[in-house]
Amino acid sequence: MTVMELRKTGAVRRPDPDEDSIPLQRVLVVEEHKLVAAGLRAILAEAPWVGSCLVADTAEDAMQVVRRHHPQIVLVSTTLGGWAGPDLCRTLREQVPHIKVVLMFGDGRVPAALAASLGTVAALSKLLAPGAIVMAIKHVAEGGRVFPKGQAAHHVKLSSREMEVLVHLSSGMSNPETAARLKLSRHTIKQHTSAVYRKLGVRNRAEAASRAQELGLIGWQTRELGLAHA
């Protein structure tokens, strides 16, 4: 178990009256790659609105930190092993919905609709400039949402659950497998699947996956989500 915490020490910076002040934030970084985690922690440490920055390298450790330290913002890496990243996002949404969850990805793209379906309020590339990352997370702390432009599908309105079902069926998972993964009944999954087909104007899984790709709904690399099947 690896959990680290960085707290501000030394002189306290007086708030700039010309800047909008926000309460000091506790931020948790969930990242399995230590160098990436250290980099994110270092740039956040420089932000005057960050009171402490905690780091966990597994979803299990992250939940322990959440229960013990009550962070206001949690950054979740898509590179956590297997389903850990998406599952952690859903768990946070269900158990501590007041926490603001930010999805951090490396290569590829994360459609806004997909990220939002996991309960996140932002999707940020780890390749962004440090200043851009800090500015985006500050916007989240202020109650904003940050998603890459041009990735939201405005002409197809799927619910969060329908988006989850779409991602699973597009990956090749069967209805029973999807039901087990989302902890829903097979009947409920069948109903959501029918709704997805109707809204996308398709007749089967293959057409749904193709249509979703065209609309940019599932542009996120399945490798990062743990959806690829052998």
Image: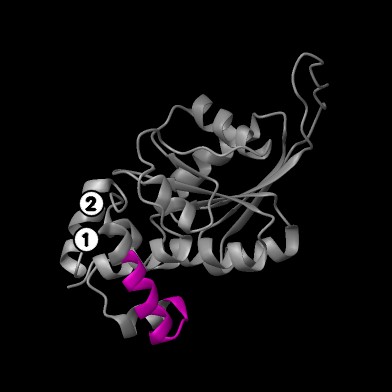
Look at the magenta stretch and give its main secondary structure: helix
Q: Residue at x 24, y 59 (%)?
A: 201
Q: Residue at x 79, y 37 (%)?
A: 23
Residue highlighted by disc 2:
213
Answer with left or right where residue 173 lies relative to residue 160.
left
Q: Toward the viewer: 70 or 46?
A: 70
Give the answer, above or below, for where 188 lies relative to 66: below
Give the answer, above or below, for where 110 lies relative to 80: above
Identity, as a three-letter code, of the amino acid under mark 2 = Gln
What is the count of numbered marks?
2
Q: Residue at x 20, y 69 (%)?
A: 205
Answer with left or right where residue 174 lies relative to residue 141.
left
Give the answer, above or below, for where 16 lies relative to 158: above
Viewport quadrant of the C terminus: bottom left
Find out whether the residues at labels 1 and 2 contact each other: C-beta distance under 8 Å.
Answer: yes
Answer with left or right where residue 13 lies relative to residue 111.
right
Residue highlighted by disc 1:
209
Q: Position of residue 134 (x, y in %)?
A: 57, 31
Viewport quadrant of the N terminus: bottom right
Please, what secondary structure does the residue beneath circle 2 have?
A: helix
Determine the CA span between mark 1 and mark 2: 6 Å
Q: Residues within 10 Å of mark 1 (few under 14, many from 20)?
A: many
- The answer to whether one can see residue 67 in this image is yes
